[in-house]
Each structure stands twice: as C-alpha cells, then as structure tokens.
Image: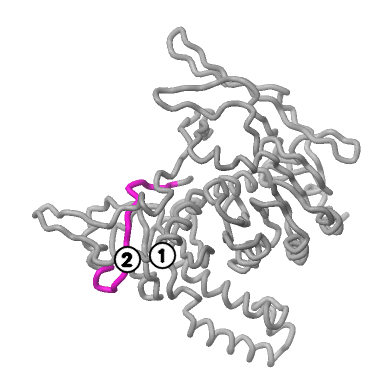
Amino acid sequence: MAIDLKAAYKTIMDDHFTPEMEIAFIDGGTRQTLRYQKVAWVIDGEEKGLRYGENPGQEAALYKLVNGNLALGEVTALAPGNYLASAPELLQSGKHPGKTNLTDADNALNILRYLDGSPCAVIVKHNNPCGVAKAATLAEAYSRANRADRLAAFGGCIALNREVDVETATLIAEAYAEVVVAPEFAPGVMDIFAAKKNLRVMRINNMANLTRFVAQRVVDFKSLIDGGIVAQWSFVPEARTAAQLIPAECVTKDGTAHTIKRLPTPQEYDDLIFGWLVEAGVTSNSVLYVKDGATVGIGTGEQDRVGVAEIARDKAYRKLADWLAWERHATPYNDLALKFGGQGRGLMAEIDEEVKARRGGLPGCSMVSDAFFPFRDGAEVGIREGITAIVQPGGAIRDWDIIDCCNDAGIAMVFTGQRSFRH
C-alpha cells in the first residue's frame, strides 16, 4: 500500500495550546505581567489557528499581546495593541497559515520598518531575505527584489510597504509565492490573486505606522533544550542615517593612527545605510552586497566571515546567470541543456562568459558585514570583485590592517560601532 507523503502537508493540526498565556517578570514584590491571546481565523467555515509549526506534525499556536506593560531598567517594551504579524487580516488563504509563513512575514516587516521612505519590497524565505529592493514604484521595487534571487523567491513571502497595484500584482502572479503582505490592495488586485488558490494574502493596516516601530523593543525569548529560557531585548540598529556612520579609524598599541583615506560618495552612503538596515533581518554570520538600493548577493548563516563573503559573491554570480537565462530564454539556467540540448549548453557557455565579464554584477557594489572583519581576507573577497565601499561595526584588533587594505585599493569604509548578530 502506497503511503501518501503529501497528506501531512495538507493536514491542519489540532493544537492543544491554551486560549490565553501569561508571562510574568518578578522583582521582589513587583510583578509585571504580559498577557497574550491565541489567534485564529475562519476559513471555509472552519476556525483554526496555525496550520502547524515549522514542520507537519508539530503543534503550534500564534499569540498576540493584549495586556501588560514591561519596563526593565531604562527600556520599555512595545505596548499591547500595536499589531503587525501577530494579527494579520487574512483576505485569501487556500490553506491556513503555518508558523513559517508568519515568521517570514514578521522578519520582512522587521526590515521594512527601516525602509519606509520609498516603495520597497522584501522577499523572505526560511526567515531570511533572498531579495530586497527600493525604487520609484512598487512594481519596480518588487521586480528588482525578485531579480536578486528569482530561484530562492519561489514559494517565498513577499512583503510590500505600499498599496499593491494591478501592475505589481500581475508581476507577482507570474511566479509562485506562499504569502503576500501589504497595507492595502487596489481594486482588481484580489481578482488577480484569486487565480493563485493557495496564495495567502494578508492585509496589515498598521503598516501605515511602520515608522513608529523603528526604535521599539520587545522581549525576545529563546527556549533551551532543558526548558530554560534566554530573554533579551530585541535588536535595534543605531546607525540609521549616513551621518551616524563613523569614518574608519583606529590607533594601534604603538600609537600609530590608521585612518581611511576615502569617504563614501552620496550614492555609496545610501547603499551602505540600505544594506545595514537590511542586515538587521539577516541570520548571522552574514555578508551582503548591495547596489543602487537593491541586494545583489546575500550570504547568511555561515561560521566564518571570509567564507560567507565568498558565498555571497558566488550567489551573485549564480543568480545573475539564472536571471539572464530566464530573461532571454524563459528557462532557468540549470534547465537550458535539458530544454535545448546541445544548443542549451552553448547558451549556458555564452551566459557564463557574460557573467564572468560582469563579475556577477558586483563592481560598484557596497559590502555589508554584520560583525567586524578579524582579518583583511574577508574584505579582499569583495575588493577583488570591484566593490567600492564597506560598512562594518569595527572594533577588531586588526582594524588597522583592514583600513590599510581599503586604502591600498581606494575603497571607502565606515564603521557602525554596533554589531548586528541575529541567531
């Protein structure tokens, strides 16, 4: 008897989590309690919460903060009632959302809150951005974000910070996505999305107030294998404008001063800030390459810094090759030989030569690192590909060597003074 392996992905779990939850912080006789309420939706006459957790068979529940105010030291938590991903309005859903759908949307919003100044698109997969771009129009922003990594965007969560118009919706409908999140949808858009029966469309009216969330903090909980919990305040990037970036400089133990010779141009500053704010939503260890307000290569979750710089570089090459194949032949790069035979192998060779000549689109990019470069080899990965500016936290013992490396190459470099680890 054949086993239906697909059935598990179609099954909505009956979770046994309680309707309400409380978490209390107690200091002597003072008790501060946060109260949460479980979230559910009615779809096809059935009221259910999350479809399942990270995997089929894992019970999961979504809770929204409904009461309580937490202040620890000089930090006060975001007040209840400011809902984003914890209480989306589900406009369309062939399937109930799962845990990953919600956390993907949440991390996209985590990035979007810093980029509200222009139309912006964030495409997230497995809680990491695979493409982020800003532009003059929402359609252009989505197109550029999708172009950054068309393959990874397949089945991802698309978050947009402006009302979705018909042009943008039409572009989205050309590919497969799991989730679309936006503040509003123009007339005719839902008719386009209706043809994608399993597309989850979520309206979050509070996205109009995203800038209010920029400096707000929440308690971030991490459960340990033995039931213990690590609690920390959520991360807020302090450098959010070009003026807050620090020209790279340091003084060695012998008193020698090392100072960067070239500061970024206005366009480089714009890309450096853009990339640093995107970095707040990328799993560490990470390095990004960005250009003209769009990601070009994203390396994430690696154990060494030079390795992740190489991964981001290699992805830029591969993703450019795939985009050229798709744009010119409506075929993924990896399928060219399968579809066109010997001619396809010739097409691949042509694309390879072009990608090599263009160095993956990396010349002119800015390089973003979530932590300092301990050695110059990490920075050199980008420098060899033609990057022109670097932003990193600074603070390494060998900052002087990375500064000298950039000066030798004519590269601009600035420090943030703050690490952006995310695990």
Seen as rendered, the residue at the extreme left is 254
The location of residue 128, given as percent across then percent down, is 57, 53
Report the disc number at residue 412: 2
Return the residue at label 1.
Answer: 268
Residue at (58, 46) in percent of width and height: 107
Q: Amino acid at mark 2?
A: Ala
Mark 2 secondary-structure assignment: strand
- Compared to residue 74, the image places residue 13 above or below, namely below
The location of residue 49, given as percent across then percent down, is 76, 35
- Compared to residue 305, the image places residue 381 above or below, namely below
Q: Residues within 10 Å of mark 1 (few under 14, many from 20)?
A: many
> Where are the magenta residues, as a range?
406-421
Residue at (50, 34) in percent of width and height: 217
Q: Nearer the viewer, residue 344 or 150?
A: 150
Tell me if 213 is positioned left or right of 167 in this view: left
Q: Nearer the viewer, residue 368 or 243?
A: 243
Q: Earlier in the sequence, mark 1 or mark 2?
A: 1
Seen as rendered, the residue at the extreme top is 29
Q: Residues within 10 Å of mark 2 (few under 14, many from 20)?
A: many
Residue 217 belongs to the span the image colors magenta: no
Q: Nearer the viewer, residue 165 or 218?
A: 165
The reply to whether the C-beta atoms of the residues labelled 1 and 2 are less than 8 Å apart is yes
Mark 1 secondary-structure assignment: helix
In the rendered image, which quarter is residue 172 located in? Answer: bottom right
Answer yes or no: is residue 20 visible.
yes
Answer yes or no: is residue 224 visible.
no
Tell me if 288 is positioned left or right of 175 in this view: left
Q: Amino acid at mark 1?
A: Glu
In the rendered image, which quarter is residue 320 located in? Answer: bottom right
Q: Quadrant of the N terminus?
A: bottom right
Residue 417 belongs to the span the image colors magenta: yes
